[in-house]
Image (cartoon, rainbow, N blue to C red):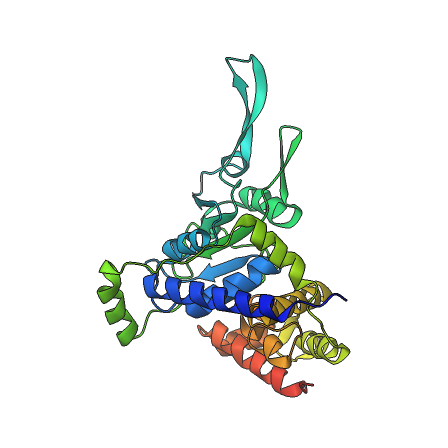
Amino acid sequence: METIQEDTLKALRSQVYSIQRTIGRKVIGSERIVRFMFIALLSDNHVLLEGVPGLAKTMLANEFAHALGLVFKRIQFTPDMLPSDVTGSIVFNLETRKMEFRKGPIFGNVLLADELNRTPPKVHSALLEGMEERHVSTGGTTENLPEPFFVIATQNPIEQEGTFPLAEALMDRFLFRYILSYPTLEEEIRILKSQDYVPDKFDPFSAEKVIALKEMVNKVYVSEDIMKYVVGIIRKTRENSMVYLGASPRTSAKYLHAARANALINGRNYVIPEDVKMMSHELLNHRLILNPEAVVSAGNNINDEVNRIIDGILSEVDAP
């Protein structure tokens, strides 16, 4: 396997950390989220952000796209939306007297799917096709999406009236589910102080560079011990007595690819156990379906119970 030059790794790590710090000064407390967004983007996946309104999710997505020199689009999902509101539709052009495809907002590099659970399943399926197949189909035509294509979806866990829960198939298309919480006292004070912040100047990425980095992820070396470690964690999710349905083999492949991306971002051309451990909760918390007894015992603290189960699984699998 072709190795990655040390200078290239150092330069990438420096640039990623610079972007994390810059966005972190604009969106206080977002450095860790930005890291997960980088991992998902470079491993050809997507991210689901879950949190109450007012936590700067839209600003975060916009700043991330700007820092990478990518085209940002936003869709505010509502119950009356149609799939064509996402993908686009066939319209009649009066000038040319011909039918033509008019592209919808999904045709961008970074798409913020805001409050995704407020729209019906038929719209979910249109977005799912784009996320998985990298193209959309409408009116008998198929249109490819631009490269790179990265979805940042949000959902509000509090207001569930009038919402449409995401199907398991759609949830599994998101590499991470990142649960946002309110900022600490110190962070909230920093938010007030940052209103007049002038962002640092830095050289943004470009679509071409992101595509090149995605190809570079495949060159990161993974030992057989690391592969066994990843598979061991995934298999333990299926054996746990508190879990009704564990993670699938597809998750193993996504997990390993994400660990490669994390190693690359950290300036290494090989994966270590820490690359696997650091993302375990965000990668597994939406893929474990608890059995009824576990749900009842957890009460309103389902997320805490899932995190405890994941911690237990990690303790049962020996790291290489």
Q: Point out residue 218 in the picture as x, y percentages from the top left corner.
A: 69, 62
* Residue 179 in view: no
- Does 287 sit above or below residue 59? below
Determine the residue positioned at 60% across, 49% down: 131
Determine the residue positioned at 71% across, 71% down: 221
As rendered, which of 291 and 80 lies closer to the eye?
80
Determine the residue positioned at 59% across, 80% down: 274
* Residue 218 in view: yes
As rendered, which of 56 and 270 lies closer to the eye?
270
Q: Quadrant of residue 134?
A: top right
Residue most toward the front?
A: 7
Determine the residue positioned at 48% across, 64% down: 15
Relative to 49, 236 lies left or right:
right
Relative to 87, 251 lies left or right:
right
Q: Point out residue 147 in the picture as x, y percentages from the top left corner.
A: 59, 46
Q: Quadrant of residue 138?
A: top right
Relative to 85, 258 lies left or right:
right
Q: Quadrant of the C terminus?
A: bottom right
Q: Point out residue 86 in the picture as x, y percentages from the top left corner.
A: 51, 39
